[in-house]
Image: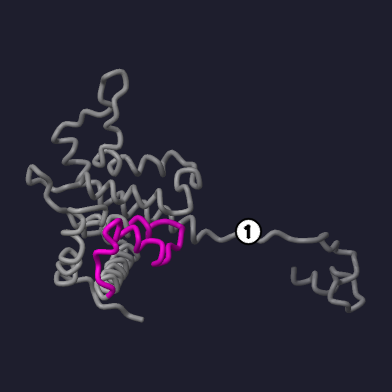
Amino acid sequence: MHMLPFDDEAQQRLADLTDNKAAEGSTMRADEIQAFMLALLSGPDEVPVHLWLPEVLGDQSEAFFEAEVQEVQDLVLRLADDMRRTLEAGSLPDLLLYEDERGMPDFYTWCNAYLYALDVVETDWFEAVDNEDFEDLFYPVMALGDVYDAHEGGEAVLNLSDKELTQLEGELPHVLLDIYRYWQAIIRKPQTVRREGAKTGRNDPCPCGSGKKYKACCGKQA
């Protein structure tokens, strides 16, 4: 079934339904929903509605009317469908970024919502891939999400300049597309078909039952 596009009107409606409740509890804002769903559709796991919808609604789920829950679900599915089409076309995702307290794009919240999805899915992405190049793709996501902003011996792990942060912000859509492509290459990789049972020798009777030797029968075409 072809879904309606997730246009500006749909984006505003999703924000109207979720943002106020997000301020009161763990319901996701519209920007967090985009990041969360982008991560889900990028990886190898099929995550059905009944698993992701409670994460979106959070602890304010009972504050939504039944019709509102259905509307949120429909809007998020349209959002995910649009993002999937964008990624499949090899285009960069257009990130929905709110403003933070300083009036700057809130990459912190967006990136943490993306990374949260990795805790929800069944597959441990890093363990499953076990590749340093794949892990390196996540540097902008983790740096902008302050994942490295822990303290070791009293010193911050990262101390990025404004120039470095701006560079990472510009790289983010590119690495998100690369992460999607990385997983798609793994998912679509042809599986090796292993032969079961003993191999038929060229001088053995042909398994087709003709009575001829394999090399004079089906083996001629092998």
Residue 221 drawn above or below residue 122 = below
The residue positioned 12% from the left and 46% from the top of the image is 100
Q: Is residue 205 depicted above or below 105 in this figure?
A: below
Whether the magenta-drawn stretch holds residue 144 is answered as no
Q: Is residue 70 above or below residue 126?
A: below
Instruction: Return the x and y of residue 49 as percentages of the image width and height.
Output: 39, 67
Question: Pointer 1: residues within 10 angstroms few (<14), some, or many (20+)?
Answer: few
| Rendered-image quadrant of the N terminus | bottom left
What range is drawn magenta here?
A: 38-66
Residue, disc 1: 192
Q: Is residue 64 left or right of residue 195?
A: left
Would you identify the image quadrant in which residue 29 lies? bottom left
Q: To which quarter of the image does residue 69 belong?
A: bottom left
Q: Amino acid at mark 1?
A: Thr
Horizontal side of residue 18 vs 115, given as left or right: left
What secondary structure do most residues of the magenta stretch adopt? Answer: helix
Q: Residue at x 27, y 47 (%)?
A: 111
Q: Position of residue 219 (x, y in %)?
A: 80, 69
Q: Among all residues in the image, which is located at the extreme left?
A: 103
Residue at screen point 21% across, 60% down: 30
Q: Is residue 162 left or right of residue 68?
A: left
Q: Is residue 48 magenta?
A: yes
x then y, percent, for residue 38: 32, 58
Which residue occupies 13% across, 35% down? 162
Q: Nearer the viewer, residue 191 or 26?
A: 26
Q: Is residue 211 left or right of residue 122?
A: right
